[in-house]
Amino acid sequence: MTNSRDDRTENTAYGSPRAVVQAGTVHGGIHIASSAGLSAPVPRQLPLSATGFVDRATHLRRLDALAEEAQVRVPVAVLSGPPGVGKTALAVHWAHSARTRFPGGCLYVGVHAHAPGPRAEASQALDSLLRALGAPPDRIPLSLDGRSALYRTETDGRRLLIVIDDVLAPAQVRPLLPASPGCMVVVTSRGSLPGLVAREGAHRLSLDVLPMADSVALLRNTVGPRVDAESGAAHDLAEHCARLPLALRVAAERLIDRPGASLSDLVTELAAEESRLDTLSEEDELSDLRAVMSASYLALDDETARFFRVLGVHPGAELSSGAASALTGTRQAAARRFLDRLTRAHLVERVREDRYRLHDLVRLYAVERVEAEGGPQERSEAVGRVARWYTHAAARAQTAEHPHFPVVPGYEPPDDLPSFSSLGEALVWFEQERTNLLAATGAAFDLGHLEIAWRLPVSVYPLFELHRHWEQWCDLHGIGLRAAENAGSVFGAARNHLGMGDALWLSGNLDAAVRHYRAALSAGREVEDPWVEGFSLRQLGTVLWQRGEREDGTAVRYIKRAVAVFREAGEERGAAMGLLGLAEIGADLEYWDEAFDHCRSAIAVFEEIGAAWSTAWARCTLGRVLTATGRADRAVAEYAAAVREFEVREDPDSRAVALIGWGEAHLALGEPARAGEMWRAALEYLRDRDDPRADGLAERLAALER
């Protein structure tokens, strides 16, 4: 910018820019390209702020003071207190008001210590946060320590606010703490997290029920002047709600729905409900809310009441209107209307467009009502419906990503499934629903829906592969294998063993992968499924070759047998994948003519069936063969085509492999400068993800430049 006093130009950069341009007068356009890709957008992940928020002035002032300290250190605030007291509401309300203090963005992650579904441990939370910060999925390490180190790198120099909601223990928080001044962390927990206070110097801000004046103010903010007209009844109503913000909001909405009723009428009603429910009022976290919830529940019409209570059995932390439709057995348009009614009544929270959740205490009440009015059968049927819906929806998303992958959702498809007009839409849906898919699989297994529990994993797992969700991928097949075994489904076991083998192979556990591939092969042969048998054989040959078992020819025999099995079954892509495996082994053995023929045959099939990504990989192998046999000019064209495809699919790992080969082709043509250009681009990517291939490539590049 230009200094207005003396016309000097001052240049200032904030954060950790990947590219900086300094220029005087510029004519025409400026085009900046970086192999690291475009900067990620500033994350703005905060949920909606709660309605009817009241004072908490002391806590807000303390949070403001801690934010000032973020200039010199990383302050950590722990908001602790009982359920329903408003911890999350306070954290989110203050975070929205403090956004301008943190220009780097606001991150939010719920670790679901008390919500349904799989608890998000620190490793999963880091995966989510790193993606929000723009880290490419393939660059995210598998280990907790590696993810935490990358997180500290990504947050360095950024002024970020991080909200970590519903924490159970300090171990869920420590790896998520930035190390650089400029950031602040706000944690909510029912516990006091003394270890975090002692070791990390966190500041504990304890929340209790609201003072009477604030309780009445919350009612007044929501209901209006009727509260002041019946001040005594307002105090009684606040006491019936135990001065819990959640209960007060529910009661206030009850009054809004009954404009002709007095506060005294509601107080009388709650007193009656309280005595009627005495037998249920044990010393648990729901007891203070039960009477208030019961009054609101009984005010619902029968259809809405049933819809509400069945929502409580959803296995995940949040859901869409489509999932709610399947869960409750209603059409999606009707489900949206019910959700709108329940949102207005503060029984359901809309967290963003078409995403809803129930406060954990409200969910507990809903489940109570299911058990009291519908029994175990209603709960089981609801979980079965929504798990089937997730299975079919996931199969659709998987088909959009990989149309040649055989999904096996089973059953007739339910109504109101999502449709995907592009791969991008399918991937967005998958990332939103990924934890629900795992939760639905587990819930289906627990309630005896074994067919669904093994079919869902084998209808969706390549989506877990695409973004490298290794841990969840393995967890998914773990449930699928138990379900198939309990159901006596040999085919289900075969498909889940094959998927588990792929997950373990790609995450580097070759020995365990071999065990699962052998189990898949045996089961696939038993049920006479050529797809399972063929890919089990191909993968066994590939992994044995990678393990160095090359002397007796077993690896090659496995892959050749895979090609024969695929051809007998008319499975064209499988046969071409087998040929590509033979081409790669042939290149390793320097059987160049054989490798060339296998590559050309594989490419012809891939192109005919439209398998563009497989074609690109085959071009890389062909480029290797061409370079080694004196046809590097043709290899350059093959690698260039492969790189273009990998860039279209946003697959940087495959792109780096292609760039290395491309550089070797240029080196063979006597063009070391071009080779160095390719290798430097690949090396930048490999170093960013601490890839072990980086050291060898760096040595080759250094030798080239000497």
Image (spheres, grey):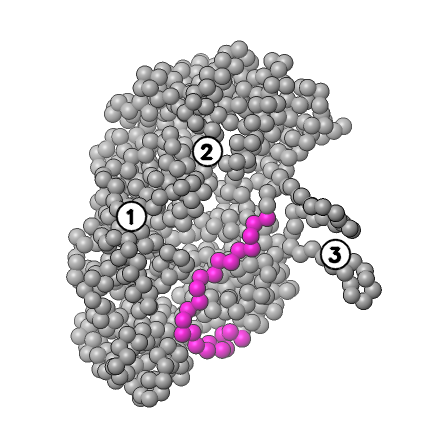
Q: CA distance from mark 2 to mark 1?
A: 35 Å
Q: Say which residue appears at 55% left-offset and 68% top-offset.
A: 98
Quadrant holding the N terminus? bottom right
616 to the left or right of 325 = right
Q: Quadrant of residue 359?
A: bottom left
Circle 1 sits in a helix, a strand or a loop, which is it?
A: loop
Secondary structure mostly seen in magenta is loop
Residue bearing the label numbered 1: 416
Please give left or right for residue 231 compared with residue 488 in the image.
Answer: right
> Which is more N-terminal, label 2 or label 3?
3
Mark closer to the chain start, 2 or 1? 1
Q: Circle 3: is it few (<14), some (14-19), or many (20+) Cα within 10 Å?
A: few
Image: 370 above or below 232? above
Q: Residues within 10 Å of mark 1 (few under 14, many from 20)?
A: some
Q: Earlier in the sequence, mark 1 or mark 3?
A: 3
Q: Is residue 320 left or right of residue 577?
A: left
Residue numbers of the magenta segment: 39-61
Q: Which residue is mark 2?
A: 506
